[in-house]
Image (cartoon, grey):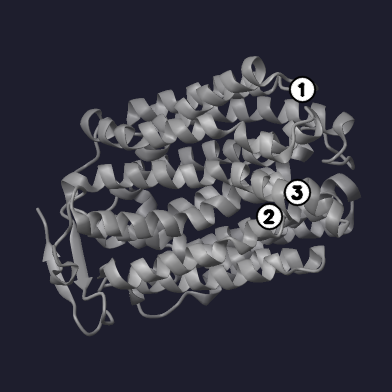
């Protein structure tokens, strides 16, 4: 089917496969960098002389800008074209990745990671919004399921890829490899992805919302990261936390009063949307702790090589590849409540098993069972959760719904990396010392298991058996033109 006609595409068509390829590859750039850096942290610390706080900021610098700006990325896509903003994000991400790979010190690397997060904030919501707007209503669940599975595979492959690259060469390769992948995404996107936008979106950008949201997240992140070393009574820690709380409160108040809000607060009146995002926050806080410490623990405490610790997660990758699209289809048939309740409970069991991984851990008896169970839980959870967060609102809000859900997930992961080591008893300790890391890791896994149980309870209480039907409204444009040149509005019953 010619994508310039403005017709929604089918999942099984060649046009649908091109759209899926572009969105999966683009999202995988961001997903992989959310996990691939963790496997290289010990090597980065040794090469650049970074302390524990520097390593945390190597992760959180990326997460901070991504979480703070992903709402803006969704709004920009709705206003100026989702494909256009998506491709700008891909190009930005590639340039920032090149700077990461060439960084001479930890300060430059952290700065480059912040720039990477900005690119991720532009491309991530665009990928989901493109899927939501491009596929027919009956195929949307399958498409999002496939995107969740394949994109999740990209994230799960991150530790394996990072370990292999660190083993064969240098940690810098984990960033430089993004450049050719981004070039491929740009080619596919320009040639095959249709443009879509929300013609009713406001044209003014919410600068106050962007600034207050970013300052709020930055204040909380800095405060919790500095707390272990400087103590809770340190004036800078107290001031940072106070600024963070105040800025987030100002963000909410401003968004309620703004004529052109980045985050229309009224969308949270939709109980399903609010419930799905609350579940997202809790379970992704748990995931953030797991993916931050699991591969570090395997290297530092259990004595695995970078490559071996990356390979350890491959069963999760394989299970998500096989099961996520099926979970998306199952959720469409039986409703999202059951998968979103069962998935986190399965993950909780896996995290209890993961907490037992210590010195000399045997892969087959100690690591593999936990990783397999974790993969089953994620496979059941991710696609229904994503589809529910997007499907709860009308299609005209596809960009903002995607942006909100991504912002919630990223903010949860950002805060968990800052807070969980503190809550688990790290204090002023080191993440690369086995004696200090082992109890912190064990306590963190148990806290994350508890968060998964809370997520399951919230899903059972707040997510309905069936999503309310609503008529999708789309505006398509010729892939070779701007949104203003060739809009074709179409409503699909």
| Quarter assignment of residue 301 | top right
Closer to viewer: mark 2 or mark 3? 3
Looking at the image, tell me whether mark 1 or mark 2 is earlier in sequence order: 2
**Is residue 455 at all visible to an observer of this figure?**
yes
Q: Secondary structure at mark 3?
A: helix
Residue 334, percent across and down? 24, 28
Q: Secondary structure at mark 1?
A: loop
Spatial CA distance of label 1 from label 2 is: 26 Å
What is the number of the mark on residue 41?
A: 3
320 is higher (above) or lower (below) than 178: above
Looking at the image, tell me whether mark 2 or mark 3 is earlier in sequence order: 3
Left-right relation of 397 to 35: left
- Residue found 67% across the figure and 41% down from its top: 292
* Crowding at mark 1 (Cα within 10 Å: few <14, some 14-19, many 20+): many
Residue 90, percent across and down? 48, 68
Q: Are marks 3 and 1 in contact (CB under 8 Å)?
A: no
What is the number of the mark on residue 60?
A: 2
Residue 253, percent across and down? 52, 63
Q: Are marks 2 and 3 in contact (CB under 8 Å)?
A: no
| Quarter assignment of residue 331 | top left
Residue 239, percent across and down? 80, 60
Q: Residue furthest front?
A: 168
Q: Which residue is tagged 1?
A: 358
* Crowding at mark 3 (Cα within 10 Å: few <14, some 14-19, many 20+): many
Q: Residue furthest top?
A: 365
Which of 366/307 is in front?
Answer: 307
Spatial CA distance of label 2 from label 3 is: 13 Å
């Amino acid at each position: 089917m010619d994508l310039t006609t403005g017709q929604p595409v089918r999942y099984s068509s060649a046009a649908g496969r091109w759209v899926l390829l572009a969105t999966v590859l683009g999202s995988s750039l961001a997903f992989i960098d959310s996990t691939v850096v963790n496997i290289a942290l010990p090597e980065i610390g040794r090469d650049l002389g970074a302390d524990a706080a520097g390593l945390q900021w190597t992760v959180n610098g990326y997460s901070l800008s991504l979480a703070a700006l992903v709402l803006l990325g969704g709004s920009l896509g709705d206003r100026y074209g989702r494909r256009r903003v998506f491709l700008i994000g891909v190009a930005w991400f590639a340039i920032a990745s090149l700077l990461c790979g060439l960084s001479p010190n930890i300060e430059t690397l952290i700065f480059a990671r912040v720039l990477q997060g900005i690119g991720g904030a532009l491309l991530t919501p665009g990928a989901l919004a493109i899927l939501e707007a491009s596929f027919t209503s009956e195929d949307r669940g399958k498409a999002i399921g496939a995107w969740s599975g394949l994109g999740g595979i990209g994230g799960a492959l991150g530790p394996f890829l990072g370990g292999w690259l660190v083993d064969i060469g240098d940690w810098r390769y984990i960033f430089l490899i993004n450049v050719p992948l981004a070039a491929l995404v740009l080619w596919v996107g320009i040639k095959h992805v249709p443009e879509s936008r929300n013609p009713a979106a406001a044209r003014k950008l919410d600068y106050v919302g962007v600034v207050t949201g970013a300052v709020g997240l930055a204040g909380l992140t800095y405060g919790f990261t500095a707390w272990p070393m400087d103590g809770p009574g340190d004036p800078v820690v107290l001031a940072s936390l106070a600024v963070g709380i105040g800025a987030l409160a100002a963000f909410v108040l401003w968004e309620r009063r703004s004529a052109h809000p980045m985050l229309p607060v009224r969308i949270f009146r939709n109980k399903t949307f609010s419930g799905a995002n609350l579940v997202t926050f809790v379970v992704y806080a748990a995931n953030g702790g797991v993916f931050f410490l699991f591969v570090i623990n395997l290297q530092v405490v259990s004595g695995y090589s970078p490559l071996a610790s990356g390979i350890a997660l491959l069963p999760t990758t394989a299970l998500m590849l096989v099961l996520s699209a099926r979970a998306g289809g199952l959720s469409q048939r039986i409703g999202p409540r059951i998968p979103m309740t069962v998935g986190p409970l399965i993950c909780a069991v896996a995290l209890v098993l993961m907490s037992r991984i210590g010195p000399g851990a045997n892969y087959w008896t100690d690591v593999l069972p936990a990783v397999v169970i974790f993969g089953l839980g994620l496979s059941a959870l991710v696609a229904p959760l994503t589809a529910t967060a997007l499907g709860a609102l009308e299609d005209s809000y596809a960009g903002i719904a995607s942006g909100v859900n991504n912002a919630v997930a990223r903010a949860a992961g950002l805060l968990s990396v800052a807070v969980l080591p503190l809550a688990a008893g790290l204090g002023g300790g080191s993440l690369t010392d086995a004696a200090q890391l082992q109890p912190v890791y064990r306590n963190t896994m148990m806290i994350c298991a508890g968060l998964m149980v809370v997520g399951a309870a919230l899903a059972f209480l707040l997510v309905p058996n069936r999503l309310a039907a609503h008529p999708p409204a789309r505006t398509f444009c010729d892939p070779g033109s701007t949104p203003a040149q060739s809009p074709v509005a179409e409503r699909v019953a």
